[in-house]
Every structure is written in structure tokens, then in C-alpha cells.
Amino acid sequence: MEFPDVVTIAVPIFVLLVLVELAAWRITGRGAYETRDAAASLIMGFGSNIAPLFGGAAILSAVWTAAYEFRQFEIPNTWWALALCFVLDDLRYYWLHRIAHERRWFWATHVVHHSSQHYNLTTALRQTWTGDIVNGVLFKTPLVLIGFHPAMLAFVFGINLIYQFWIHTELIKRMGPFELLFNTPSHHRVHHATNPRYLDANYAGVFIIWDKMFGTFVPEDDAEKPRYGIIKNLGTFNPFVIAFNEWINIFKDLASARSLREVVGYTLGPPGWSPDGSRLTSAKLKARWASTHCAEPPTAATAG
Amino acid sequence: MTEIAVSLAGIAVLVLVSWFLGALRTAKVTQEAAAERLAFDEPDFAQGDWLVGTDGISAAAVSADGAEGALVFVIGDGLGTRRFRRGGVAVERSGAILAFKTSEPSLPKVRVSAPDEATAARWVLTLAEPRL
């Protein structure tokens, strides 16, 4: 079963769209670009493409090939199987993405993508150099075991990635009824924002309905412009520091851990967890915001 | 190798175009900008005195009760902040320059240029030692 490598095919289109967005920014003043930030994002994207060549791709291929031998259903290479695969993989993406925000070990991989204080098409390319093996084995292997061929999975995820590229822009404000079902620039701006009301929301890849189903949807509020980045914004554009900063922080914390509880907390607890509660998790940030803004802490269901 | 070369060339083109269009910008730290950024990042930090670096790339603040400090630094065209308990960050003074050592991989040191040595010395006492 063979499918085209859609991401590689799309790269020239990515480049063209970045140029268009740059020109639009210069002409209209909408959105924002900073050269060093954009350069860092592009280098992170480049690194994320070659990182699997150091063994991750081979490991994943071997795991999935072996897992496919234990598939539970014989799923044919048909249009309906492709559609079903796409939908289930997008559901898989939602949960991986959510866990990547709620559990520090996975956040250490994903934080790279959020580390820019800008939100433009180069931000879409700011991707991690780590985590492919663990994420791929844990979260995609179940779909292989169901019976979806690994090549089909790779193809639908490529489509998913291409879809997520164009939503990383401030040029598009709203998209009417399209916003009811699909992830859009507006929904994803909320996801990238560090405004407390917007934290840990809108994890969707393609279908925003997952956030609405699982209570993590927050609409963009025109009265509160998103501010992008991470809670403790990085002080460098060095791509190696961007790639490994949170991993270094995790291992520094583990070196000081005094119990199994602290080891588990520092790795599988939420980002910002600390034994003495001195650091801020997203929940604490929201509660702090709520104490100065409203009667009850905002949740994804009420923050809108 | 060809694909890698083409990718790197594409990156170079985009970076050069962004530079040509004026995207290489550096923020300047003013008290207003620093206060606004700190208020967003740390809304429960009751801002007291400010030391805005004379070079416009950083600033330090002390909380109204003197128990905490904060740093504001430039990163590209934006600002970042760090908050710490008084005495929680090592501070060294060299003339009128204060060097705050955060020990973070992405921000190992923040230098704040005070207007004079006396001001820098006063700020070392303000932020470097915990209150008794």
C-alpha cells in the first residue's frame, strides 16, 4: 500500500505562503514577523525533519510493521477506510495534544512549538526534535493494531499536518459556520495564547468538535487579544536551547528529587508542578486570574 | 543531501526576505513597557520600585513589600519576565552593572545597567539578600 509523501510535496507551497504572509504583514500591518524568531522557527522545522533520520523513523517503522501483524480487523485500502482513518487519527491527535499540555514529559517535546511569541506561518513549522518515538509508539500503534495500515496512517497524518499549517496566522479573523466543526486560525490563536482564560484549550488538529465534546473549547474573545508564547518565555533564539530547554529543566528537577512521588510529579505531573507548590501550573494560573477577574475560576466551558 | 541543501536554501531565502522587509526588530525596555509586561505575566506581583537599564535591554523591579523581585528582558521584538523571591537569584555588581544569574538554560544571566554605581549598590541590597 503506497501513498504520496504529501508533506514533502507541500513544502514549496509552505514557502510561498510564508512569503505571501510576509508581504501581507508589510502591506496591511496585520500579524507580526521578527526575523530572528522566524529563523529559529524555520531551523526548528528543518531539524524536526531530519531528527527521525537518526533512528526514530526506523524504530517506528519496525514497531508498526510488527504491530500490523497483530491487527484485529482487515481494513481495505478504500476511500471510506481512508476517511475513517483520518477521523480516528484526528481523535488520536486531540488526545496526544491534550496530554502533551497536561503531562510534563510530553510537554517537554511540545513546548518547542509554543515557544515563539509570534503567531504566523513560520510558527507552524517550529516543531520538536524529540518525542517522535515515544509519541508514535504510544499513540499511533493502537490504530495500527485496529487494522489501519501504517502507510495509510502516515498519509492521513500528513494531511492533518498540512491542514494545521495554514491556521497559524493572524491574517484570517473568523470563518463563519466553518468554525463550528473545524479548527481555524481563530480557534488555534486561543490555543497558542498564554492569556489565562485561553490556557490549555482548543487542542484540535482538524476537527474542533473534539474540544467541544471533551470540554476544552474556548472561543476567541475580540476583547482579549491573545499574547503568544509560554508562561516563562525563553530568553534565546538558539535552536538547540529551544529544543532541549525543558528536558534540561526536567533532569535538573529529577536530580533534586527526594522521593518517587517527586520523580513522578516532575515527569508525569502537569507542567509547573513542584513538591512544595511554589511553581505555577495552568490550573493555578487560571485560579490566580480568576481571583482578580471573576467570582469563579474559568474553565474551558465557562471562559468564553 | 540535495533535499537538505534545498531546505537550507529555502530557509535562507525566507530569512533574508523577512530581514529585507524590516522584520529584524529589537524591543526597548521602558518602565511603561516593562510594567505592562510584568502585569500580564505576574498579575499578583505588586510592583514597587523599578530600575530600568540605561541600555534599554532589561529592567529590574522590587515588589511593594520588598519580598520579591522581577526581571524584564528583551527577546527580539518582545519582552520576557522572571519573578523570584528576594535572595532567590544570585546578583553580582560590576561597577554600575548588575548581573542576575538565573541558571536557566535559555536565560543564564540578565544584566541591568544602572545609571551609577551607587544605584547599582542599592539595588544589590534591595534584591540580593533576604530580609531578616
Image (cartoon, coloured by chain):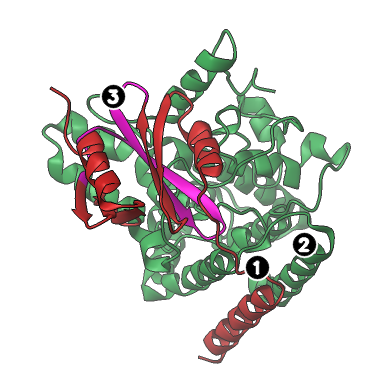
Residues tagged 2 and 3 counted as in contact (Cβ below 8 A): no
Residue indicated by mark 3 = A277
Magenta part mainly helix, strand or loop?
A: strand
Residue indicated by mark 1 = B23
Residue indicated by mark 2 = A25
Q: Residues within 10 Å of mark 3 (few under 14, many from 20)?
A: few
Q: Is residue B78 magenta?
A: yes
The answer to whether residue A218 shows anywhere in this view is yes
Where is residue A59? Give x, y as percent: 38, 66
Where is residue A84? Give x, y as percent: 70, 47
Mark pair 1, 2: CA separation: 10 Å
Mark pair 2, 3: CA separation: 42 Å
Where is residue A148? Give x, y as percent: 59, 54
Q: Which span of residues is magenta-colored?
A: B64-90
Relative to B14, does residue B63 appear above or below in the rendering?
above
Residues tagged 1 and 2 counted as in contact (Cβ below 8 A): yes
Q: Is residue B12 magenta?
A: no
Q: Quick check: B85 left or right of B16?
A: left
Mark pair 3, 1: CA separation: 40 Å
Q: The disc labelled 2 sits on which kind of residue?
A: Trp
Relative to A24, does residue A101 appear above or below in the rendering?
above
Chain letter of disc 2 in the image: A
Chain letter of disc 3 in the image: A
Report the chain shown in green. A
Report the chain shown in red. B
Q: Quick check: A63 left or right of A174?
A: left
Q: The disc labelled 1 sits on which kind of residue?
A: Ala
Residue at 53% x, 55% y: name it: B28
Quick one: quadrant of the C terminus of chain B? Answer: top left
